[in-house]
Amino acid sequence: MDDMYAKAGQILDFLHEIELVVADLYRRFSRSFVEDRVIWEDLSQDEESHAAMVTELKNTLLKNGSPFEIGKVNLAALKTYRQGIERHIARLQSGELGRRKALFIARDFEKTLVEHRFYESIKSHNPDYQAIQARIQKETELHLQKLENYIRTLFPA
């Protein structure tokens, strides 16, 4: 049983780190691409908020002792995802990323989060847990829509 709690904690810690690294990337984009500063700052603040919500998820799940189950989750995939974000931070710092590429990278990161549904890897009947989980998922879907609409406006096909 302790293994399950440890694994859940590890998954949520990874998700917390990912939200913070994405927030950092978006903050850096806001400084590099000032013409898009508003959207980047908005997204960055949301990601920081998601990191705080992940902490709430962890507290709700592990402190109340409510039953939960862990579905298929690939910790290696989460690690690879985080490393990809960190690689883009390095590429941005070395001047390899332009404005358009930054927008497409962000869209792809949000799309991956939506499609892989990392947050659904831990299921709990706790209503507080479910509410926070649903909010993160919904906001991530909104990020994807916001980025897709913004890209379409700037770079019509």
Image: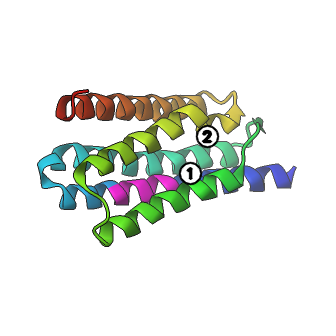
66, 15: nearer the viewer: 15
In reply to whether residue 10 is colored magenta, the answer given is no
| Separation of residues labelled 2 and 1 (CA atoms) | 8 Å
What residue is at 65 percent from the left and 51 percent from the top? 77
Vertical placement of residue 32 versus 146, above or below: below
In the rendered view of the protein, which quadrant contains the C terminus?
top left
What residue is at 30 percent from the left and 59 percent from the top? 97
- Numbered circle sitting on residue 15: 1
Please, what is the three-letter code of the amino acid marked with disc 1? Leu
Can you give x and y, in whole percent of width and height, for residue 124 in the image? 70, 32
117, 126: nearer the viewer: 117
Say whether residue 133 is left or right of residue 97: right
Magenta span dominant secondary structure: helix
- Numbered circle sitting on residue 139: none
Can you give x and y, in whole percent of width and height, for residue 40 in the image? 25, 48
Say whether residue 60 is left or right of residue 51: right
Q: Is residue 17 visible to us here?
A: no
Vertical placement of residue 11 versus 151, above or below: below
Q: What span is in magenta? A: 18-25
Q: Disc 2, disc 1: CB below 8 Å? A: yes
Local packing at callout 1 (Cα closer than 10 Å; few below 14, some 14-19, many 20+) is many
Looking at this view, name the residue that lies furthest to the left: 35
Provide the residue designation for mark 2: 118
Q: Identify the mark nearer the N-term, 2 or 1.
A: 1
Local packing at callout 2 (Cα closer than 10 Å; few below 14, some 14-19, many 20+) is many
In terms of secondary structure, where does tag 2 sit? helix
In terms of secondary structure, where does tag 1 sit? helix
